[in-house]
Image: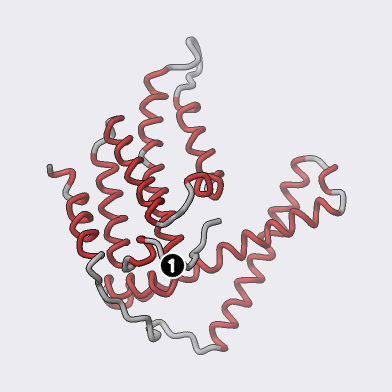
Amino acid sequence: MLTYRPGNSLAHRLGPRSKLAFQAGFAVAVFARPTPAWLAAMTGAGLVCLAAARLSPVRVLWAYRVVVLVLALGPALGGVVLGPPWFRVDPAVASLRAVARVVPVLLVSAAFVYSTPVRDTRAAIQRTVPGRPGQLLGVGVGLTVRFVPVVRADVRRIREAVRARGGDRRSLRDRASRLATLSVLRALARSDRLALALRARCFAYDPTLPTLRLSRLDYPVLALAVLLAATPLL
């Protein structure tokens, strides 16, 4: 799973608020026009964002391989019909266009996660969304970004432990049941320890967050974000 990595790329030097605004405008622009040419252009823009973060597209696809697999199943299942001719091209193509719009957004999101510290993301959210909703949203994003990789690592260790004890010789149903049960139990235990650690450290909804300043690089990105958000009106 992709996480933040320090660096000196163009994406790393941008502020979190401009990158969040660009993500929002980019998503609006992608879903504004589902034509093949427009989707190809947006996919190219997503690859440019990966290059700005010095992140390999192959690494992104591998990190989100489960998501890509689920998206790939959409067109195949969308064309299946119960009866002759058993598969229709038009529904499959329509499903493919709908699925293809997710890929550029996924690329831009990967560049953001890879180039933005969690604390900066939380600060940008809390200073953009006012009041307690912004605080809750910032806390939720921060905990999710930190907690999900830990849970994934636990699942990986459980799977390796089951395999080391000869679990790979059991049926698929038994292996899936064991993995799901042990993973849920481990996640619940992690949640309890996380809650205890937050109370022990006097968790605050409004901590001292890093100072955010817009640089000269951020203003063109903000202007581009506004332009992308206005795409449906053009």
Count of marks, rendered view:
1
Q: Quadrant of the C terminus?
A: top left
Amino acid residing under circle 1: Val
Colouring of the image: secondary structure
On the image, numbered disc 1 is attached to which residue? 141
Find the residue positioned furthest to the left: 234
Q: Residue at x 72, y 47 (%)?
A: 176
In this rendering, would 220 be left or right of 50?
A: left
- Neighbour tally class for label 1: few under 14, some 14-19, many 20 plus, Cα within 10 Å: some
* Residue 87 drawn above or below residue 122: above
* Residue 145 drawn above or below residue 66: below
The answer to which of 210 and 56 lies nearer the viewer is 56
In this rendering, would 132 be left or right of 227?
A: right
Q: Residue at x 28, y 42 (%)?
A: 31
Measured as percent of width and height from the top left, residue 113 is found at 44, 60
The answer to which of 129 and 58 lies nearer the viewer is 58
Q: Quadrant of the N terminus?
A: bottom right
Measured as percent of width and height from the top left, residue 168 is found at 82, 45
Measured as percent of width and height from the top left, residue 141 is found at 43, 67
The answer to which of 100 and 172 lies nearer the viewer is 100
* Residue 74 drawn above or below residue 63: above
Find the residue positioned furthest to the top: 84
The answer to which of 143 and 113 lies nearer the viewer is 113
Find the residue positioned furthest to the front: 8
Q: Residue at x 29, y 43 (%)?
A: 30
Disc 1 element = helix
* Residue 207 drawn above or below residue 66: below
Q: Where on the picture, by quarter, is residue 42?
A: top left
Measured as percent of width and height from the top left, residue 2 is found at 52, 57
